[in-house]
Image: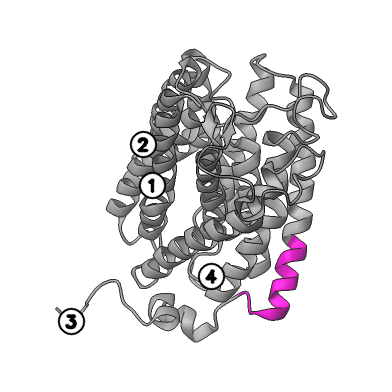
């Protein structure tokens, strides 16, 4: 057990939790209409609580309980056999558990943005719980827990590389988001602008800072790899922010606040898988391309495909994570065939299981809020509260 490594991962764990609460909650909450902001906050908080308990019960063991090719088994359910002195690498295993738990929290929270303003609260919780156990935890094992996509698996000694979650987090959440947006259907009115760009900017700022724990903490040590991961994360975010804003300026004659901070998130998602394998110059390239690529993906999904992924989860997180994963191979930091192969395998699995789970959950609880609740806003209809007192 190493004191410096332990201290850093303690901090990184707090930073990654901050990405969901309050970072993602504010980022998503500001993007929706004022009558739905509390529903977004409620979903983020409830997901954080529920995923934490399920990670303790089964998720951690499925992901990291053993070294089987497909899953980790059940040897670590409810942290069986783990106490304060149990070591994993140079860390207390309970700390490794907590750090990985924050990833299990934010991944299903990401796809909340795809069906914001119209999904029923019960369906969101039931589906997210099953999805984390059936999709996120197994995929985590495949890449990070010694499974068949990691070193020594089907791609041999090279393995598929995913330093901090381009495949495990962003591809899975992005594809689930796109499919759920299709299954739940579009909103009645898709033209209302974000009710609070200020919330969006504050949330993006918290995500940016928290991402240092997300990527830097994935080194699982206080070392040069962690320092480089933090540096390239910042460079990519800055480059993507400016390239998104510049591309907006070229296309529309102005750059928006919501646009530049969405570019920030695109740059962060895109550098995530590569952050432990590339240097600052590569990060500048990845971020610069990501700001334009993800903006064009938004246009493709919204206008050409006419799909209502409410908060552009697939276009930003999904496309960004996939792009960054492929760039590992393009830049020579890994095998391109291994990267592409892992993306295909995980993508097919994610879409298939997401579809099955969504259909099963819909037999128990309605996917979508009723028309009156959707019209009046989910804050009041689902939770009996309003974000703003309109009478004072």
Position above or below: 191 against 12: below
SS assignment at label 1: helix
- Mark toward the start of the polypeptide (4 vs 2): 4
Q: Which residues are drawn in magenta?
A: 355-367
SS assignment at label 2: helix
- Mark toward the start of the polypeptide (3 vs 4): 4
Residue holding disc 1: 18
Q: Residue most toward the left?
A: 392
Q: CA distance from mark 2 to mark 1?
A: 9 Å
Give the foreground label among 4 and 2: 2
Question: Closest to the observer: 77 or 40?
Answer: 77
Give the foreground label among 2 and 1: 1
Residue at left 62%, top 70%? 126
SS assignment at label 3: loop
Q: CA distance from mark 4 to mark 2?
A: 32 Å
Magenta part mainly helix, strand or loop? helix
């Amino acid at each position: 057990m190493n004191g410096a490594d332990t201290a850093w991962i303690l901090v990184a764990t707090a930073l990654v939790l901050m990405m969901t609460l309050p970072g993602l909650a504010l980022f998503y909450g500001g993007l929706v209409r004022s009558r739905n902001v509390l529903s977004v906050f409620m979903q983020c908080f409830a997901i954080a609580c529920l995923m934490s308990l399920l990670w303790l019960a089964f998720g951690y063991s499925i992901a990291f309980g053993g070294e089987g090719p497909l899953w980790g088994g059940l040897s670590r359910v409810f942290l069986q056999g783990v106490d304060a002195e149990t070591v994993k690498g140079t860390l207390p295993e309970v700390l490794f558990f907590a750090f990985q738990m924050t990833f299990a929290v934010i991944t299903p929270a990401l796809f909340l943005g795809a069906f914001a303003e119209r999904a029923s609260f019960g369906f969101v919780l039931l589906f997210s719980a099953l999805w984390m156990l059936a999709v996120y935890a197994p995929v985590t094992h495949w890449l990070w827990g010694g499974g068949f996509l990691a070193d020594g698996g089907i791609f041999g000694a090279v393995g598929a590389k995913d330093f901090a979650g381009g495949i495990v987090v962003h591809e899975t959440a992005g594809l689930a988001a796109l499919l759920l947006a299709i299954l739940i259907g579009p909103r009645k009115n898709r033209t209302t602008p974000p009710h609070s760009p200020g919330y969006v900017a504050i949330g993006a700022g918290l995500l940016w800072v928290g991402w240092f724990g997300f990527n830097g903490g994935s080194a699982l040590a206080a070392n040069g790899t962690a320092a480089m991961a933090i540096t390239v994360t910042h460079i990519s975010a800055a480059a993507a922010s400016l390239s998104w804003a510049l591309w907006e300026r070229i296309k529309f004659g102005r750059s928006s606040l919501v646009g530049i901070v969405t570019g920030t998130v695109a740059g962060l998602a895109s550098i995530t898988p590569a952050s432990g394998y590339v240097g600052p110059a590569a990060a500048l390239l990845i971020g610069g391309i990501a700001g334009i690529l993800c903006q064009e993906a938004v246009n493709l999904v919204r206008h050409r495909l006419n799909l209502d992924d409410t908060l552009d989860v697939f276009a930003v997180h999904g496309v960004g994570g996939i792009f960054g994963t492929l760039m590992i191979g393009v830049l020579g930091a890994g095998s391109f065939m291994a990267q592409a192969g892992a993306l295909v395998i995980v993508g097919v699995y994610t879409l298939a299981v997401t579809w099955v789970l969504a259909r099963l959950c819909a037999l128990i609880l309605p996917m979508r809020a009723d028309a009156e609740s959707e019209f009046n806003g989910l804050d009041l209809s689902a939770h009996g509260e309003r974000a703003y007192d309109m009478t004072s």
